[in-house]
């Protein structure tokens, strides 16, 4: 188990200099259920985030992806705010 300092606010980075992103647990707390994997060539794909545990950061999985368009390994993983919208914004039910 790693210690998780909660008071630190400055941007932490990986050993190779990439900024650390939020964890899947933090993302799910925001009500988001999916991620978008972007490539600099314009290719992107949407994935369900359920397969990754809470303590994994979005930046941790970036090296796992190889772009189908250009073969790049420099993916950018971001929370999918579109499909992760809270249900109250999707429903049109009116309160009595
Ligand atoms: Zn690409």
Image (cartoon, grey):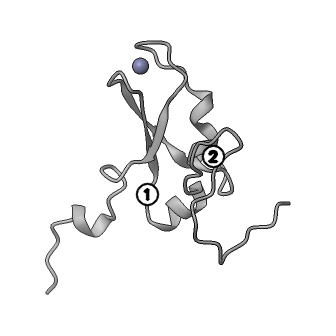
Q: Position of residue 83 (x, y in %)?
A: 33, 49
Residue 52's label in the rendered image is: 2
Label located before the other in sequence (1 or 2): 1
Q: Seen in the image, is 13 located left or right of residue 81? A: right
Q: Which residue is at the front of the view, 8 or 84?
A: 8
Task: Name the residue rendered at 56%, 26% in the picture.
Answer: 65
Task: Name the residue rendered at 72%, 71% in the picture.
Answer: 5
Task: Name the residue rendered at 38%, 48% in the picture.
Answer: 80
Name the residue furthest right: 1
Q: CA distance from mark 1 to mark 2?
A: 13 Å
Q: Residues within 10 Å of mark 1 (few under 14, many from 20)?
A: many
- Label 1, on which residue? 32
User: Is ligand 1 within 8 Å of the beta carbon of the residue shown at mark 1?
Assistant: no
Q: Seen in the image, is 19 located left or right of residue 96? A: right
Residue 55's label in the rendered image is: none
- Quadrant hosting ligand 1: top left
């Amino acid at each position: 188990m790693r210690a998780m300092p909660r008071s630190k606010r400055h941007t932490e980075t990986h050993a190779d200099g990439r900024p650390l992103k939020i964890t899947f647990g933090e993302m799910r707390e925001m009500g988001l259920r999916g991620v978008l994997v972007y490539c600099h060539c314009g290719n992107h794909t949407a994935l369900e985030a359920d397969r990754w545990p809470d303590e994994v950061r979005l930046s941790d999985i970036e090296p796992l992806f190889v772009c189908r368009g250009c073969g790049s390994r420099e993916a950018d993983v971001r929370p999918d705010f579109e499909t992760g919208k809270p249900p109250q914004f999707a429903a049109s039910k009116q309160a009595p």
